[in-house]
Image: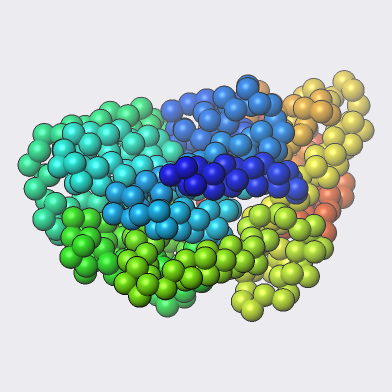
Amino acid sequence: MGLVLKIAALKLIFHCIFNNRYDYFRDEFDYLACGDHLAWGYVDHPPLVPFIVHVTRLILGDGLRAIRFPAALAASAVVVLTGLIAREMGGRRFAVMLAALGVAAAPIYLSDGSLLTTNAFEPVLWMGCVYCAMLAVNRNDARYWLWFGVVAGIGLEEKYSMGVFGAGMAVGLLATRQRRFLTSRWIWMGAGAALLIFLPNLVWNVENHWPFAELMRNIRSDGRDVQLPFVAFLAQQALLVHPLLAPLWIAGLAALLCSRRFAGFRMLGWCYLAVFAFFEVTKGKNYYLAPIYPMLLAAGAVVLESGIARTRRAWLKPAVVTVVLASAACLAPIVVPVLPVDGYLAYQKKLPFAVPRMERRHLGSDLPQHYADQFGWREMTAAVAAIRQEIPAGERPACGIFANDYGEAGALDFFGRGYGLPPALSGHQSYFLWGPRGYTGNCMIVLNSSRERLEGLFDQVEYRGKSANPYALEQHWIFLCRGAKFGSLAAVWPALKKWR
């Protein structure tokens, strides 16, 4: 485990070096804005990540490395947990080290440590639950299920997908001899602990009429996400975790399902199958399964270690490590900004595969979304500030800024402080809940709308140009509008709700 801790520390240092190479990511603005409006829930996610970013900013400040530090730390924690899981599975020095190294090198976990998103914390919480379950089995002590419930409850406050994992674990228990734990009071106490921790967000959802459920229905009806057929979905699992690591986690899954050595942990194999089936049937994004793979990599590492021991070919150990490190270095630029943008574009053209796109609007972008959505925000804010500065001083305080989505609104709130801009308005996601902030709507700077629509709402509509960045996913069209035809902004606000 000392070697595992060194791997985790090196991974943390790696992220701290490269985590400020490009700029703030669209979704990070959402968490920053929500962190300024602490609550027990938000339209598109639970409250834990906004709380984390709020505390982080108080301690470390607003720099890119600062706000991404919790994500980098969580990514390193997953490395340690994976090593512990491999050890509980009976792995010795090489298996423990290889499992940790595989997680440290996998593209999806490199990505998790590079951006502040809810995805960054999922693996450490899912694997925290797995570790508690394994301790319950190996120690024959049902009290660990109470801690499973505590971690699961925290996970539900971080991302609702923890509920899918919990249901998968229930399937795994019912399908195996570990169903014996279901007669223990400790597992039900754990379920109660999870519910109690999740209760504040549950109450918030009830009081706000289940906004997340409404959001998911809208996204599905709009056809926003790219829906993959079964074979493509499975193939992208291999790509996310790393193609050369696919034999390792596949061997781990097979061992968990079939090997007598792993009979005590058979529930984990069934858990994976249940979670995979859920996301395949519901056409989830390819990365929704990512938090579950560390346990499969750990099992695969134990299998490989045993195979090498049987063949007595010790030279395979350094060879495997070398291949993992070299292949990780080859794919790292896809998910970590180790190259300048032009260098990345040249590198991308040489790849033997296309970098996956998650949403249809991303299909025409040169850069993948996680890079393209880090550009253009500063230019947009500067353009809006310049337009607002041209408004007569007496009219300026009453002129609001309406953004099309939380990325625009959050960027205006974050960068706009340096220009003296007021808080932005938007009907998108949680910005809708924060309302019109007292603006009448008679003077508005509006981003990314159409002239035709605005002319139906205002007496005067003046196109003032657009902000542009060649690497950005989208350009930002800016209009100055006066003379509201709709009465007050408060009266029309319900019609501006955009939950999709």
Residue 201: x and y in percent read 38, 32
Q: What kind of colouring is applied to the model shown? A: rainbow
Residue at the image point whose x is 73% and y is 36% from the top:
412
Residue 356: x and y in percent read 58, 68
Residue 373: x and y in percent read 69, 52
- Eyeballing the image, is 390 above or below 211? above
Quarter of the image with the N terminus in it: top left
- Between 477 and 54, the one lying in front of the other is 54
- Between 129 and 427, the one lying in front of the other is 129
- Eyeballing the image, is 60 above or below 6? above
Q: Examine the image and state in which quarter residue 247 appears.
A: bottom left
Residue 57: x and y in percent read 64, 26
Q: Could you tell me if residue 321 is visible in this image?
A: yes
Q: Could you tell me if residue 361 is visible in this image?
A: no
Residue at the image point whose x is 24% and y is 42% from the top:
135
Residue at the image point whose x is 37% and y is 46% from the top:
84
Residue at the image point whose x is 69% and y is 26% from the top:
61
Instruction: Say how many tags the image has.
Output: 0
- Between 442 and 129, the one lying in front of the other is 129
Image position of 146 (left or right of 403): left
Image position of 15 (left or right of 338): left
- Eyeballing the image, is 238 above or below 411? below
Q: Examine the image and state in which quarter residue 357 appears.
A: bottom right
- Between 415 and 194, the one lying in front of the other is 194
Image position of 376 (left or right of 158): right
Image position of 464 (left or right of 141): right
